[in-house]
Image (cartoon, rainbow, N blue to C red):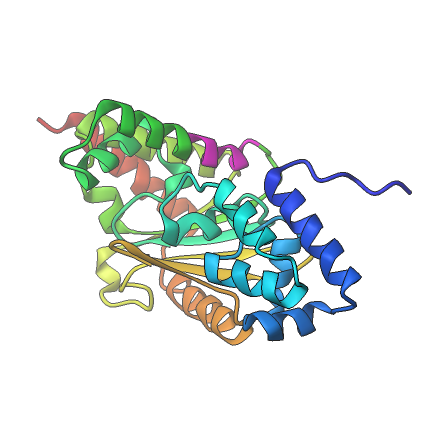
Amino acid sequence: MTKKQPSTARQKYGDELRRRRLAANLTQEALSEEVVCSPTLISHIEAGRRLPNPDDATRIDQALGTDGWFARWLKDLEHRYADHFAEAAELEQQAAEIRQFAALLVPGVLQTQAYARAVFRAYHPNYTAEDVDRRVVNRTERARILDNPAHPVVWTLLDEAVLRRTVGGRHVMAEQLTKIADMAEAGRLRLHVLPFTVGAHALMEGMVSLMSFTDTAPAAYTEGVLTGRLMDDPALVTEGRSIYDLALSEALPLQDSLALTRAVAEEHSHEH
């Protein structure tokens, strides 16, 4: 059977890494020891899901004797996202299942253009229209992973604060919450809301995204202001999933979550 050719620059990067590694008679585990990273990272890079950071690319060149080749190529593969999110964005596009939690903000892949625009304007008080437009386009392109009715499977857990905080005005919020409810009602995502009445819960400190794949190890991503952390350590990812499940057990059932989301959307649409 003919091997499928890489279709993106990242996949070509990964394919070349695999070719050079095999030519050097190194396993993924052996190369990871030289690079000082996990074998899972090497697997993700070779599959075209992730790119190494500059330091890892330099150590790959040193381990394979490629004279800076991988480090130079990396510079040509510019990220469209913040550095702390770029790797997670790559993985998100390949995930078979995504379990996401948001404490204050609608997750990026679910945002309407109007909601996203309001978010970017709030992040950057000295914004330019061109910069905001570019960011909105990037976010809209991310959301295309939801165009496939089957994959990825998306679990969305929202704190009630996400529904209540007015971002972009009442009409923007009504449209945003209606979109989420419509997607959940159509079966495109599984929606659960953690109501204020729950009080403290396991995920109240911030956002998390848990990503599973068909052919490699799962990963977890957490984010704060100007920071983000992608984790592929099996123990940490397992702990993250356990914490997610704990918070999920406190949430409203699907139908109650849908009803609350639509009720809050209606409240936004009638506010004066």
Q: Quadrant of the N terminus?
A: top right
Residue 144 place in picture, x, y as percent: 51, 32
> Which quarter of the rendered picture does the C terminus lie within?
top left
| Left or right: residue 256 compared with residue 123 | right
Q: Residue at x 27, y 64 (%)?
A: 205
Q: Residue at x 63, y 67 (%)?
A: 63
Magenta part, dominant SS? helix
Judged left or right of residue 224, residue 70 is right
Considering every residue shown, the one lying at the far right of the view is 1
Asked whether residue 6 appears in the rendered view, the answer is yes
The magenta region covers: 140-147
**Which residue of the protein is positioned furthest toward the front in this rendering?**
67
Q: Nearer the viewer, residue 121 or 51?
A: 51
* One can see residue 214 in this view: no
**Residue 39 position by quadrant:** bottom right
- Residue closest to the eye, 125 or 261: 125
Q: Position of residue 80 (x, y in %)?
A: 42, 38
Of residues 5 and 238, which is closer to you in this image? Answer: 5
Q: At 51% from the left edge and 33% from the top edge, which residue is drawn?
A: 186
Is 149 drawn above or below residue 253 in the view shown?
A: above
Q: Check if residue 141 falls in the magenta segment.
A: yes
- Front position in the image: 264 or 26: 26
Judge whether 69 appears above or below 120 on screen.
below
Give yes or no for residue 142 being in the magenta stretch.
yes
Q: Give the image location of residue 16, x and y in percent.
A: 70, 50
Residue 234 versus residue 53 in the image, above or below: below
Q: Residue at x 40, y 50 (%)?
A: 85
- Image coords of residue 46 (percent x, y): 66, 54
- Relative side of 195 to 89, left or right: left
